[in-house]
Image: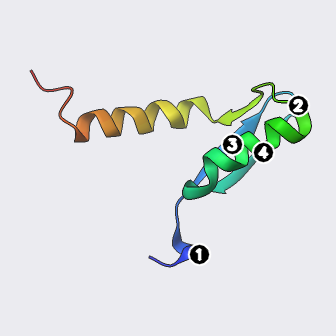
Amino acid sequence: MSENDEPTVPVHCEACETTNRVALSDVATAVERHNERVHDGEECAQVDPDVADQLADLVAEDLGLFEE
């Protein structure tokens, strides 16, 4: 997969009323950098909560955490 084919994740900042798509490998850095630069470190920007929940479910399923 080339760099241009990397999946992107929506990052939402309610305080700024913005949503941007960020490469999956850059999400943590981008969110931290935005919050530090724009909001004095307050955790305003975050991965879209619906997407975060879906990703968590996929990871849990892949790890077999839903199996009895």
Secondary structure, mark 3, is strand
Task: Indicate which disc residue 39 carries.
Answer: 2
N-term mark: 1 or 4: 1
The answer to whether any part of residue 18 appears in the image is: no
N-term mark: 3 or 1: 1
Residue 27 in percent (x, y) is at 62, 49
Q: Please name the amino acid that badge 3 sits on.
A: Val
Q: Residue at x 78, y 45 (%)?
A: 33
N-term mark: 4 or 2: 4
Q: Categorize mark 2 by other alpha carbons within 10 Å: few (<14), some (14-19), many (20+).
A: some
Q: Distance between the residues labelled 3 and 2?
A: 15 Å
Task: Indicate which disc residue 11 carries.
Answer: 3
> Relative to 2, does residue 38 appear above or below in the rendering?
above
53 or 28: nearer the viewer: 28
Give the total number of marks visible in the rendering: 4
Q: Are marks 3 and 2 in contact (CB under 8 Å)?
A: no
Q: Please name the amino acid that badge 4 sits on.
A: Arg
Q: Do the residues labelled 4 and 3 touch (CB within 8 Å)?
A: no
Q: Please name the amino acid that badge 2 sits on.
A: His
Q: Residue at x 88, y 31 (%)?
A: 39
Q: Are marks 3 and 1 in contact (CB under 8 Å)?
A: no
Residue highlighted by disc 4: 33
Q: Are marks 1 and 4 in contact (CB under 8 Å)?
A: no
Answer left or right for 43 relative to 2: right
Task: Indicate which disc residue 4 carries.
Answer: 1
Secondary structure, mark 2, is helix
